[in-house]
Image: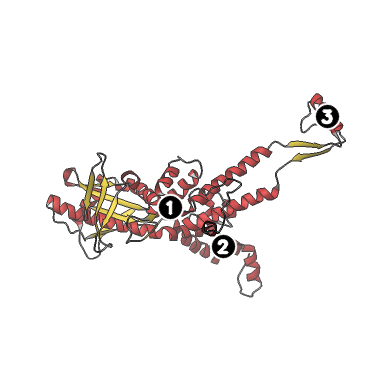
Amino acid sequence: MSNEQKKVSHYILERPSGWVRPYGGTSATSKEIEKSYLGEKKYGTSFVQSIIDIRASFITGEGIVIKEKQGIEANAELDYINQVVDYNQIDEMLSQIAVLTEIEGKLLGVLEPAEQNLINVKIFPFNLYGYNVVQDENDPQIIKEVEYTDIDGKLQKVPYGEFSYRTFGSSLWYYPNKANPRISSVMEYIEDLDRASQDLREINHLFANPTPYFKCADQAETQNLAAALKNLNWQIGKILVTTADYSLVETDRESVQALIDEMVSLAERISGSTGVPIYFLGMARLLNNRATALAMLEQLENSIKKERNILVSWFNELFFNILTKSNEDYDTNFNPDSIECEIIRPAILDVDQAVLTKLVELYDKKAISLKTLLTFVPEIESPEEEIKLISGIDTGIVTE
């Protein structure tokens, strides 16, 4: 055996179907996610838009609250930061900022002097500027500056302290230029789900109008029947008497079910990776009750909590740098370390416990049945079965 023959250890066969994985089995880039979000791709656009918008909505919650740090009086600092926030329309841009972090997995805000002794906060989308975070040569955990190319093709450098930068999604702090948005790892599943749903629609389209099939004994019977049907202008719904076996061509039900099972499996994987409840992916029928829906929102809250905390950290650094830059550029005397912010989680997440508390009060007063109460408990899939279990134990609980 020659050396060339020894090198051949296996053979790679082309797939007969011609099917190719959209991203080669790897995560999608932020540019590909952006194109899908903007509706520029053939498959997956509606799911990508829904997932990103829902996650961004939960990340921003009830909005940003800026306040004094405990034990520090900072009326002047709060007033100035609120002016800068209004000047830059940060409240209005908050949801768009969150969307950007979901698309790119990183967020850069650069500070520039503005009119009326204010500070301009310029958000730099990576897909537009392709910026690079420069680390210290001796300690890669220290960020020195950010480099980017302006519209004139000139390299610009922003020193540390004049920008705020964070990575989101799947990222590590010592690789500031590497970040995978949460949705990037499931973009293939998202596109497959869209394809599967369109395949199902195509099947329904093909078989929506039944195709009659006549099985004749021989060629002569076939020709005679064809001529008779043509002369009668026969259509489905009219009486037909024939010696041929008659049936309607329809799709294989097992194949359709396999397609539906694939859609459910894809939706479950997408939901598990992004935290977005499965009913936002078109699988509302899989819900058992309202309480389960609220429990899934809590799952989404747990999924985006990390991103919300990072965004809060980004804003805290931003406000610190704004006050510092004001002191340097406008000779103010602000305390940069005097204020902080928080983002309040969505109010709907607090409704669940309030509703359950009220329902327990109503049950205690015998205003509602146990079945009604159990319907709102996420862990209980079947209130009827739970009541049977309770009824089998002498607890003194009134079930009806």
Which mark, by number, is residue 55?
1
Tell me the mark number nearer the camera, choosing from 3 and 1: 3
From the top left corner, tell me how far across and down residue 267 is, in percent: 54, 53
**Residue at 50 percent of width and 58 percent of height:** 272
Label 2: which secondary element: helix
Residue 105 is at least partly visible in this image: yes
Q: Report the quarter where the N terminus lies.
A: bottom right
Answer few, some or many: residues within 10 Å of disc 3's Cα (few below 14, many 20 plus, some between 14 and 19). few
Which callout, 3 or 2, points to the residue nearer the camera?
Answer: 3
Kindly give the residue lying farthest to the bottom in the view shown.
394
> Is 255 on the left or on the right of 52, as rendered?
right
The residue under label 2 is: 373
Point out the tag, 3 or 1, that comes first from the N-terminus: 1
The residue at the point 78 percent across, 33 percent down is 237
Q: Are marks 1 and 2 in contact (CB under 8 Å)?
A: no
Task: Provide residue 251's location: percent of width, then percent of height.
Answer: 70, 44
Q: Is residue 125 above or below residue 345?
A: above
Q: Residues within 10 Å of mark 2 (few under 14, many from 20)?
A: some
State the separation of the CA atoms marked 1 and 2: 30 Å
**Hey, which residue is sitting farthest left in the picture?**
331
Residue 85 seen: no
Can you identify the residue that label 3 sits on?
223
What is the quadrant of residue 141 in the picture?
A: bottom left
Callout 1 secondary element:
helix
- In the structure shown, which secondary structural element does the residue marked by tag 3 occupy? helix
Is residue 253 shown left or right of residue 59?
right
Amino acid type at circle 1 is: Arg
The C terminus appears in which quarter of the rendering? bottom right
Residue at left offset 30%, top offset 59%: 313
Amino acid type at mark 2: Leu
Total numbered labels placed on residues in the image: 3
